[in-house]
Image (spheres, rainbow, N blue to C red):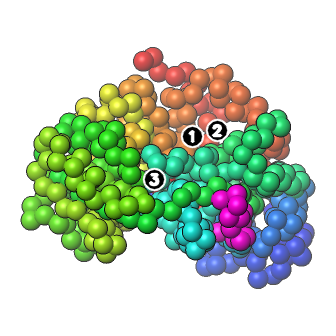
Amino acid sequence: MFDDALHRTLVGIVGPSHVLVDDDLTAGYRVDWTGRFRGTTPAVVRPRDTAEVAAVVAACHSAGVALVPQGGNTGLVGGGVPGDAEVVLSLRRLDHIEPVDRRAAQVTVGAGATLAAVQQAAVDAGFAFGVDLGARAAATIGGMVATNAGGLHLIRHGGMRQQVVGHEAVLADGSVVRHLGGLLKDNTGYDLGSLLCGSEGTLAVVTAVRLRLVRRSEHRVAALLAFTTVDAALEGAWALRDTLTSLEAIELFFGEGVELVCGVLGATAPFGVTHPVYVLVACADDRDPTDDLAGAVDGLDGIVDVAVASTAERRAALWRLREGHTEAINSLGPPHKLDITLPASALPAFPEQVRARVAAVDPAARVWLFGHVGDGNLHVNVTGPAPDDDRTDEAVLELVASLGGSISAEHGIGVAKRAYLHLNRTPAEIAAFRAIKEALDPDGILNPRVLLPPVGAPTTPPVR
Ligand code: FAD
Ligand code: MLT
Ligand code: ZN
């Protein structure tokens, strides 16, 4: 229980100004980015280094008080905010970035370093960081490890799991596991760093990671391609994926999304009319990739409009149309954000199928589709249903599972999808997950409300 004694202990560890208890001070830590998930907390604790994290976790462990680790609070499945009793453990102050190890092409960073700061450090040293996403200014590396974030460049460099070459973390009893050497070949037992990727704060608190860096490409170009049908857009996207060696990102979105982004954010679309479907393609290379991109686009069927952007400013304007979806959709009220992957063969029919499924459950709901189509990841956002009305979530996730897809491509399970994990994972798999959780956190103090299904939830996967 959180009592005066624990409060005093925490103040002794991190100092009085880093134990927040007043409602107005904890407010921003108690609600998620979308506004759909909110809770209460007895305190937000903000340690500054690994030793303080370890002491805070040990104190909460002794008192039997659960913790929710929180980084930038940009997560989209409600996993980083408290329910009604957990202490929020904010890792944002662990934002140190060590000098880049140029020989190894690696950098060690604190869990609270933002993605943007790590990207800048990499660029300053002549490298790049392999993962990029729209929340770069606020998302932290610790949160990105915990969610195994994917993002815009996954088709080129992989997601977070592919970048982590060393880790430091605090276990539920306050002990520290540290393996930051960054050796690329290192078969000395279980790969705890990999296990932490996607663990959503349930197994340990990530305090630092060593990240691989990638080569920096000096030349970039982006193009927005307009199509009249989903089929043509997908065929085009796959053809570009298979021919362009400089490909960095390939994204899909729809006319209604572009109209919303332009209306809400004041963005400008490059064409005089709204087209039904868009593909945004980005290339980066050591030499100017514009001719390669133009050549590849020329050979595509079904394109009705093309805008090519070479300058940083014009590329940013095209990217605004895609990245602006999250903010623009949120302006309609807390969306139900469903983040799914489908087998390529299921993608062409999916937009129509999912719209029909949602309409059957809630005719007033609106469906917004966009995503990282190069890796089969679509974001299905539903606006209209109340935050706690899960009927459309269930309908969409059941459809996705029946098509052989994943109910979480890159955002994680969190609170939002824990009741649906059985759609993708067998009872034996879920039992193995529980055994891992039990081994590392036997008292269940690390983020107890996320990822694992609530006791009594269905366990049988649907028949496919
Ligand atoms: P938080 O939201 O603070 O936490 C997320 C989860 O990680 C929680 O379960 C929390 O308990 C846990 N956690 C946080 N820090 C730690 C730690 N140090 N140790 C252990 N557990 C921890 N995601 C993508 O994958 N791809 C995208 O393209 C993408 N684009 C986005 C664009 C926008 C505009 C927004 C708002 C979000 C986007 N996201 C995207 C989602 C989000 O940015 C990622 O999930 C990100 O990884 C969350 O990082 P964070 O620091 O904000 O984590
Ligand atoms: C994106 O790709 O824009 C993000 O994952 C955020 C979102 O799904 O809204
Ligand atoms: Zn995404």
Q: Nearer the viewer, residue 262 or 310?
A: 310
| Residue ranking furthest to the front | 287
Whether label 2 touches label 3, CB < 8 Å = no
Q: Nearer the viewer, residue 248 or 354?
A: 248
Q: Is residue 52 above or below residue 225?
A: below
**Residue type beneath disc 1:** Arg
Residue of label 2: 452
Mark 2 closeness class: few <14, some 14–19, many ≥20 residues within 10 Å: many
Instruction: State ligand 1's quadrant.
Output: bottom right
| Of the image marks 1 and 2, the number of the one nearer the N terminus | 1
- Per the model, the C-alpha gap separating discs 2 and 3 is 29 Å
Magenta region? 97-115
| Of the image marks 2 and 3, the number of the one nearer the N terminus | 3
Secondary structure of the magenta portion, mostly?
loop
Q: Secondary structure at mark 2?
A: loop
Residue of label 1: 418
x then y, percent, for residue 113: 65, 69
| Of the image marks 1 and 3, the number of the one nearer the N terminus | 3
* Foreground: disc 1 or disc 3: 3
Q: Residue at position x 79%, y 36% from top? A: 187
**Residue type beneath disc 2:** Leu
Q: Residue at position x 83%, y 75% from top? A: 14
